[in-house]
Every structure is written in C-alpha cells, then in structure tokens.
Image (cartoon, helix red, strand yellow):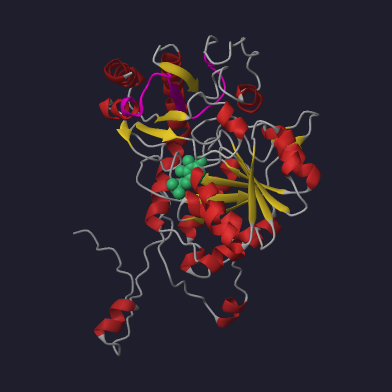
C-alpha cells in the first residue's frame, strides 16, 4: 500500500470555539502555484503584520497594501498592464470610464479655473462641465478640435486643463492632436486625452512624433475599459494613466476622497479580455472599413464619417498619427467619398454616417429598427454590433462643428465580432426597406 502523504499540521487552538477556529483556520495552500490568469484577490480589510507596518503604509505607490479600496494584487496587476499598454508609468482604476473622466476634472480643477473641451467630446464629459463643474464655480468652453488656433484663442490665464479626444465622439473628426498639444505645451496647460478609441493600440499617447523630431505626449490618458479591454459588453470600468508622479499623487488623493473602488471580479474580466484585445481591435477595424466603404457608395448615404476615409474631417491628422507610413491620401471631392478608404494604420471599429437629405426622422428610426444583427444600444467594443441615431442640433456648441454636418442627423455604427459580410447584408436590407 502506498504511503499516505504527510498531512499539513492543523494546529487550531483547541481552546477556541468552532466559530473562531473556522475564521482563524491555519491551513495555507502550497506556494508555487502558477497559471495563465492571475488569482482573484478580493478584500476590504487587508492585514498588517505590525503597527510599524501600519505607520509605514504607502497608499500612492504600489509598495504595500493598505485597504481594499486602494487595490489588491489583482487590481495592481491590471493597472501595471494598462500603464505599459499606454506607455505610461502609473495607472488608477475607476468604476466606469465616466468616473475616470470625472476624477480627472475633480482632481485638477478648483473654483475660478477654466476647462476647455473639444466640441465633439464624449457627451457626458460636456454634461459634467455644464451641470456639475459650473455649480462648483469652474468655467468651461469648447474649442474646435480641428483648429489649434481656435484652442490658442480660447486659452486664458485661468485655463487649468484641456481635454483631447481622438477621434471625437459620434462625428468622428480626428483632431489636430500634435498642433493642440503644441499649444498646450507652450502655455504649460495640463492635457487629458480620452483614449478610449485608440485603446493604446492606434497610437502611443505619451510619445507622439512631433514635427521637428521631438516627441509630444499627453499628461493624462483616460480609457473606458468598458469598451475594448473588457470586450464582452458586460463590465463597466475606467482607467487613468500618467507618467508624472506629481499628477499621480493629485489624482490618487482625490481617488481616495471619492472612494472610487472597483470589484475584483470585474478586474478579472478585464484581465481575461486584455490578451485578445489587439486581435479584436484589428478585426473590428477591418470590418468597420469594409462597411464604411460599402455605405460611402450607397445612394441613400450623404457621407460616411470614418477617420480612414479621405472625405472624413481630420483624415490628414488621423494619417499623421495612426498611419504615418501610409502613402499620401488620394484626392477626395469633399462630401462624397470618391477616394477609397485607407487600408493601413489603425482606426477602431466605430464610425458614423449622415443619411441623405431626404430621410425623415421616422425613416431614421425605421432604419435602426429594421436592422437585425445590429442592436439599438449605447457603448461599443463588445461582440454584438450596435446602432444609435443622434440629432446633434443641441449637442454642439460651435458653428464650425455644425457647418461640417449637412443635416445634424447622424447614425453611429459600432462593429461587433459578426462576419462583416453578414453585417453588410443587414445594412443593405435595412437601407432598401427604409432609405
Ligand atoms: C464609453 C465611453 C466613456 C465612458 O465609459 P463608461 O464606462 O461607459 O462610463 C468615455 N469616453 C468615451 C470616448 C467612451 O466611448
């Protein structure tokens, strides 16, 4: 008979009651377990080995653990991976992309300060400025993301923060990122990029190639992990990355004041999604370009808004940042996409189109509802393709933004993981029925 393995010692004190013994059970699993995915460590309380350790705790950097709200090995792991993905040094997690945006605003802005937003900024960021920051005595204004001179004109001595977004929400204009960063650098103003679209894959936000061979970078990059990093359409989370230890301290302090914790099972989901993100991003990008090209040639479509299309506003800026080695863009005749969509570079799986002038509002609704694979819904980066219709008449502050749109009515498509030919057939049947 084989010798039975030695059982580990179980010296629970016989003096304890069973309810204490079950809580203070001494068993430790053997060390040395390694597997593909990291363990899920969940905690509110974290034990300190001594009172001296309590006094030496370090909440801002990852040298010790302090309390579940400030992280466990699981969230530290995700933060480190996101910091490397974006080319940053430090990362903080927030319970949603919008919470990450809010944290940046609430950490950096004081009464009397001003924040500048691109006119095509993620809608809830503008709402936050309009409804919450204004109540705190913080001014805000919008600038045209395609015009660095406009940003220059709107800077005041009170401007403390400039938001950037590439590409912009819904209308997809790709900003003059280098020009805007140059203006901010010259004035010493802190920049925060909403990098959800680029996802750390389309361009390196902290090391962009400046015109004179120098590098230009943002100060802060915010990312809705809800989208590509998680990829399942089932988790809300956001991140804030920076290279600057001082900024990290400022952000981390406010992060603690606001109590922005994340659930470790959600962190586990994002860690599970990360390894396949680049493949999903590339596949959704490819599919989106096929569908953008298809729609650009459809008579019921006035214009497709996709940064890789020469007719899309800011296309040259997209090329500069996201496809620097691509040959020059072929000439385009403005509104119509005569020139083919670029096949190089990176462009995410989300784009919009303007329906032809004859579409009524009822037709737009009917088109969204006639789609069978595309579901009506917000968000993006998940497995199921989504459609949403927008009326931008009250959404844009600047006349230059309105002037770029024919009718102010835009339909946005977010491409999932279905086969692009099936998605194209779905668009074709819905256009035939309603366009
Ligand atoms: C979705 C999104 C956000 C917000 O992310 P949530 O996790 O949904 O709060 C912020 N910015 C952009 C550009 C987004 O698309």
Does residue 247 appear to the left or right of 431 in the view shown?
A: right
**Residue 359 is inside the magenta segment:** yes
Nearest to the observer: residue 50 or residue 26: 50
Q: Is residue 237 above or below residue 326?
A: below
- Residue 36 shows up from this direction: no
First to last magenta residue range: 341-363
Q: Is residue 244 left or right of residue 429?
A: right
Give x and y (percent) for residue 109: 65, 59
Residue 421 location in percent, x, y? 33, 17
As for residue 55 lying within the magenta part, the answer is no
Quarter-of-image position of residue 228: top left
Residue at 26%, 82% (x, y): give it: 19
Name the residue rendered at 43%, 45% in the picture: 226
Give me the residue at 32% from left, 16% from top.
Answer: 428
- Please, is residue 301 above or below residue 402 in the view? above
On screen, residue 158 versus residue 70, left or right, reads: right
């Amino acid at each position: 008979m084989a010798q039975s393995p030695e059982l580990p010692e179980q010296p629970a004190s016989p003096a304890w009651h069973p309810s204490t013994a079950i809580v203070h059970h001494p068993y430790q699993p053997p060390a040395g377990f390694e597997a593909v995915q990291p363990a899920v460590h969940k905690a509110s309380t974290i034990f300190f080995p001594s009172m001296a350790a309590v006094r030496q705790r370090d909440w801002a950097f990852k040298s010790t653990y302090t309390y579940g709200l400030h992280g466990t090995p699981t969230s530290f792991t995700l933060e480190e991976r996101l910091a490397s993905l974006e080319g940053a040094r430090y990362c903080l997690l927030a319970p949603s992309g919008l919470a990450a945006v809010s944290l940046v605003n609430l950490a950096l802005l004081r009464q009397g300060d001003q924040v500048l937003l691109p006119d095509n900024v993620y809608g809830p960021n503008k709402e936050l400025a309009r409804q919450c920051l204004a109540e705190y005595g913080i001014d805000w204004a919008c600038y045209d993301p395609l015009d660095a001179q406009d940003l220059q004109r709107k800077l005041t001595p009170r401007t403390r923060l400039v938001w950037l977004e590439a590409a912009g929400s819904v209308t997809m204009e790709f900003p003059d990122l280098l020009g805007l960063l140059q203006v901010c650098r010259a004035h010493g103003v802190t920049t925060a990029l909403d990098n959800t679209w680029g996802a750390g894959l389309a361009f390196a936000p902290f090391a962009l190639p400046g015109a004179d061979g120098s590098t230009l970078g943002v100060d802060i990059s915010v990312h809705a992990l809800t989208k590509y990093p998680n990829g399942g359409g089932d988790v809300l989370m956001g991140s804030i990355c920076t290279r600057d230890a001082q900024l990290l301290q400022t952000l981390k302090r406010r992060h603690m004041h606001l109590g922005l914790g994340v659930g470790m099972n959600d962190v586990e989901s994002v860690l599970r999604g990360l390894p396949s993100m680049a493949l999903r991003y590339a596949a959704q990008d490819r599919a989106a370009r096929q569908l953008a090209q298809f729609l650009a040639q459809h008579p019921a479509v006035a214009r497709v808004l996709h940064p890789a299309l020469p007719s899309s506003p800011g296309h040259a800026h997209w090329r500069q940042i996201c496809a620097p080695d691509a040959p020059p863009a072929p000439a385009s005749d403005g509104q119509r996409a005569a020139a083919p969509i670029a096949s190089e570079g990176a462009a995410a799986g989300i784009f919009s189109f303007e329906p032809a002038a004859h579409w009524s509002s009822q037709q737009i609704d009917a088109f969204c509802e006639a789609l069978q694979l595309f579901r009506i819904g917000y968000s993006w980066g998940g497995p199921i393709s989504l459609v949403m219709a927008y009326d931008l008449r009250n959404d844009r502050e600047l006349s230059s933004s309105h002037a770029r749109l024919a009718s102010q009515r835009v339909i946005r498509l977010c491409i999932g993981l279905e086969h692009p030919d099936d998605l194209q057939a779905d668009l074709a049947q819905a256009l035939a029925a309603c366009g």
